């Protein structure tokens, strides 16, 4: 898969893509963001930050497995185009969910002890979104980057995780210090921006699929 806007001389495109997708994944509603808010309200913002760090413990094997599978499949142009279409549809669904599903179901019952990191790890392992994300969206970027230079996938991964964890930590901080950020207008505006960003990436995946079938 050759994503249209990526050029061998524009190495920072991988970093920029990782940054943008990391911001979107970090702020959009979902199981992990809910646990970040819940644990912050039960304890403090540091507990929410522990949850935010949990992808560092869970996503490594997922990334490796999805990248290896995609690398084998992408050699076939029809299979590669089919995956691009699937990735585009997944991005469209994420865009809709991000724009219109911004509510959180918070459990405020107090815990006897702080097991925030454990809850974050369990939530991420049981959540199908990381698998879908890395199989349909992340892997194409990583394999394209690998084809240019063996170290380039790190640009996407670093950009993604720094912004993912940074965004979720900021949610914990804002929640911990009494802000109603996730219930306010600014959060909804941010979600609309994230939704549009996802649509841009979806369009890119669809165009790549069309080019692959020519």
Image: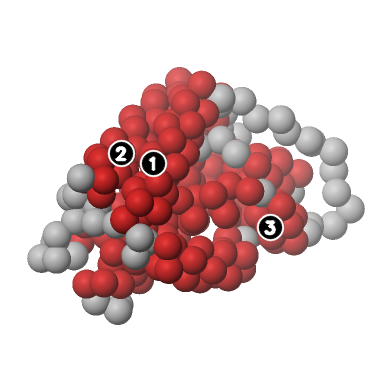
- Give residue 70's quadrant in the image: bottom left
Residue drawn where x is 30% and y is 77% of the image = 151
Location of mark 3 (residue): 125
Q: Is residue 47 visible?
A: no
The image's mark for residue 85 is 1
Q: Secondary structure at mark 1?
A: helix
Residue drawn where x is 34% and y is 33% of the image = 199
Q: Earlier in the sequence, mark 3 or mark 2?
A: 3
Callout 1: few (<14), some (14-19), or many (20+) C-alpha neighbours within 10 Å?
A: many
Residue drawn where x is 24% and y is 76% of the image = 149
Q: Earlier in the sequence, mark 3 or mark 1?
A: 1
Which residue occupies the foreground of this view, 207 or 128? 207
In the image, farthest residue toward the left: 9
Residue 76 rendering spot, x and y as whole percentages: 35, 60
Q: Secondary structure at mark 2?
A: helix
Q: CA distance from mark 3 to mark 1?
A: 26 Å
Q: CA distance from mark 3 to mark 2?
A: 29 Å
Location of mark 2 (residue): 206
| Above or below 104: residue 77 | below
Q: Check contact, mark 3 vs mark 2: CB within 8 A.
A: no
Q: Secondary structure at mark 3?
A: helix
Q: Check contact, mark 1 vs mark 2: CB within 8 A.
A: yes
- Give residue 33's quadrant in the image: top right
| Above or below 60: residue 99 | above
The image's mark for residue 161 is none
Q: Nearer the viewer, mark 3 or mark 2?
A: 2
Residue 125 rendering spot, x and y as whole percentages: 68, 57
């Amino acid at each position: 898969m050759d994503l249209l806007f990526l050029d061998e001389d524009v190495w920072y495109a991988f970093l920029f893509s990782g940054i943008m997708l990391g911001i979107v994944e970090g702020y959009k509603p979902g199981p992990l963001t809910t646990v970040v808010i819940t644990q912050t309200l039960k304890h403090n913002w540091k507990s929410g930050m522990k949850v935010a760090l949990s992808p560092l413990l869970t996503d490594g094997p997922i990334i490796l497995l999805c990248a290896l599978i995609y690398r084998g499949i992408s050699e076939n142009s029809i299979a590669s185009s089919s995956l691009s279409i699937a990735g585009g549809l997944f991005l469209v669904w994420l865009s809709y969910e991000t724009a219109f599903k911004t509510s959180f179901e918070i459990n405020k019952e107090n815990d006897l002890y702080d097991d925030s990191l454990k809850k974050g790890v369990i939530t991420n392992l049981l959540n199908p979104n990381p698998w879908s994300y890395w199989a349909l969206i992340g892997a194409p970027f990583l394999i394209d980057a690998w084809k240019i230079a063996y170290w380039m996938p790190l640009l996407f991964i670093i950009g993604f995780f720094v912004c993912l964890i940074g965004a979720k930590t900021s949610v914990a901080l804002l929640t911990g210090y009494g802000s109603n950020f996730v219930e306010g207008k600014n959060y909804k505006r941010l979600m609309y921006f994230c939704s549009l960003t996802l649509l841009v990436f979806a369009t890119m995946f669809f165009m790549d699929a069309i080019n692959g079938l020519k």
